[in-house]
Image: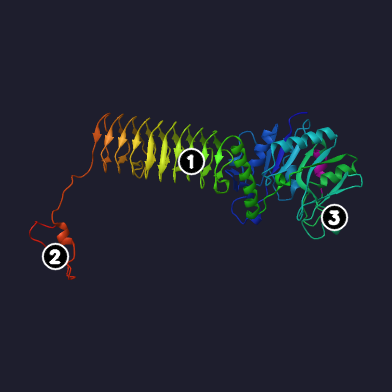
């Protein structure tokens, strides 16, 4: 059997989301909804993946390379959406149709459905599941021998009878078809229903009427086929997706002390024996090595090598690289910077657009002034350097290997290797100041004193 063509129906706007953003572009654990079935299809061995979009083509910008886009010109239902992709369907490979708002469908389940379809010899195989509350779903009607007779839609009053509404086995909106059979049936769909739409399940009716066999494959875990219609649905699906992500990392040797208070995106990678403490968010394509500790921090699109220590309350922004054994401490923000092996940024600092060598210590409140109002500039700090507390490095500037800066310095010129850079106003003491600045005990205004010179 040739690698399947997978068609993902994603042209609906999702009005129940009450959002200017198309439903399938809403984010789920670091990935737009529509990309969850795209990745699952690719992982299941799809030869071609086609995403059906509306004429606005809002999804085009997020689709991975190699994924095709088809346009449904009119919002005329799932049948019309599938027909929009017909030009991309090969006759020598099965066709799998998936809804773009069903993000938890696994590659394993896709493969099982395709295997069941191939083994049955059916012209079409529908994926079904059994729900305690099937409201809103199309019901699967079988004959006395268990064969599929039809799918009854229930979107509007009059679509189904009371007996049909009592059925708990539902259509998941996922179908495997023989391509020639699908191609022949789609032009024959009708809008003779309450919604006046072209329903894809009517293809099954047409195939049965033509004498073809239609099979069904029951998906045991109904959570895999949960759809997202509104933000409440999205929250329920997010909880399931996040729990699965946590489980995958913990089974691979990562300690997550409190999964309920931890956010980890789908594309995050974490090495074994790393500890994730509560109230940590790890987003985007972040990679964390082995034996790291992350405490109550926010990380996005950054790379941490082995043995790194972050937080509490660290903020690592995109482009950050922490080399082996580096430490970023309390209330430190790092952006687009490379922090060398065993270097430390212990607390209360902002390091942006910088390169810091190995074994360097950046004192509390070290700031890289990287933006001059028009452009960003980089700071370079060498290996084994030490910045004093409250040092500001005004980029572009460099601090050499083994160099020091004095506390409270504003460094605007390069500090040579091994040198001490100090840039601050010389201290001046005004003697007797407290006598003039403190009110008298009887409540009078502060006394002026002529004994110690000009109070200014």
- Residue 33 vertical position relative to residue 290 in the rendered view, above or below: below
Q: Residue 210's x, y, as percent?
A: 90, 41
Q: Secondary structure at mark 1?
A: strand
What range is drawn magenta here?
Answer: 182-189
Mark 1 in CB contact with mark 3 (< 8 angstroms): no
Q: Residue 369's x, y, as percent?
A: 34, 42
Determine the residue positioned at 57% across, 42% down: 265
Q: Tell me which corner region of the image, top left, top right, bottom left or bottom right, holds residue 224.
A: top right
As measured in the structure, the alpha-carbon distance from the residue carrying label 1 to the one carrying label 3 is 53 Å
Q: Which mark is residue 164?
A: 3
- The residue that disc 1 covers is 294
- The residue that disc 2 covers is 447
> How many residues crowd around disc 1 within 10 Å: few (fewer than 14), some, or many (20 or more)?
many
Looking at the rendering, in which quadrant would you find the C terminus? bottom left
Name the N-terminal-most of marks 1 and 2: 1
Please say whether residue 188 is one of the residues in the magenta stretch. Answer: yes
Q: Is 202 placed left or right of 392 in the picture?
A: right
Determine the residue positioned at 80% across, 38% down: 177
């Amino acid at each position: 059997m040739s690698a399947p063509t997978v068609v993902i129906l994603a042209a609906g706007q999702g009005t129940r989301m009450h959002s200017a953003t198309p439903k399938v572009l809403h984010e789920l654990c670091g990935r737009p909804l529509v990309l969850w079935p795209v990745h699952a299809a690719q992982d299941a061995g799809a030869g071609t993946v086609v995403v059906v979009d509306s004429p606005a083509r809002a999804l085009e910008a997020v689709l991975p390379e190699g994924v095709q886009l088809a346009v449904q010109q009119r919002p005329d239902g799932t049948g019309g959406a599938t027909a929009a992709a017909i030009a991309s369907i090969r006759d020598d490979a099965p066709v799998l149709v998936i809804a773009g708002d069903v993000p938890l469908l696994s590659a394993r389940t896709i493969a099982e459905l395709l295997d069941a379809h191939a083994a049955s010899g059916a012209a079409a195989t529908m994926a079904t599941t059994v729900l305690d509350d099937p409201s809103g779903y199309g019901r699967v009607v079988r004959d006395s021998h268990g064969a599929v007779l039809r799918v009854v839609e229930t979107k509007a009053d009059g679509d189904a009878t009371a007996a049909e509404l009592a059925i708990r086995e539902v259509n998941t909106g996922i179908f495997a078809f023989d391509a020639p059979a699908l191609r022949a049936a789609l032009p024959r769909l009708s809008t003779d229903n309450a919604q006046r739409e072209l329903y894809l399940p009517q293809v099954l009716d047409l195939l049965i009427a033509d004498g073809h066999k239609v099979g069904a494959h029951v998906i045991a875990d109904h959570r895999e086929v949960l759809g997202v219609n509104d933000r409440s649905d999205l929250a329920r699906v997010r909880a399931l997706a996040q729990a699965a992500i946590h489980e995958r990392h913990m089974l691979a040797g990562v300690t997550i002390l409190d999964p309920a208070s931890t956010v980890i995106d789908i594309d995050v990678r974490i090495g074994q024996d790393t500890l994730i403490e509560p109230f940590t968010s790890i987003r985007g394509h972040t990679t964390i090595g082995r034996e790291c500790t992350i405490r109550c921090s926010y990380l996005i699109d950054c790379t941490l090598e082995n043995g790194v220590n972050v937080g509490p309350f660290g903020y690592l922004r995109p482009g950050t690289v922490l080399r082996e054994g580096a430490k970023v401490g309390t209330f430190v923000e790092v952006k687009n910077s490379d922090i060398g092996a065993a270097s430390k940024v212990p607390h209360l600092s902002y390091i942006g657009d910088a390169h810091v060598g190995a074994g360097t210590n950046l004192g509390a409140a070290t700031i890289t002034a990287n933006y001059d109002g028009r452009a960003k500039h980089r700071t370079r700090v060498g290996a084994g350097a030490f910045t004093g507390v409250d040092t500001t490095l005004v980029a572009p500037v460099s601090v050499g290997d083994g160099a020091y800066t004095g506390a409270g310095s504003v460094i605007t010129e390069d500090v040579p290797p091994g040198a001490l850079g100090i840039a601050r106003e010389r201290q001046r003491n005004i003697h007797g100041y407290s006598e003039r600045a403190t009110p008298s005990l009887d409540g009078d205004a502060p006394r002026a004193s002529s004994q110690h010179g000009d109070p200014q």
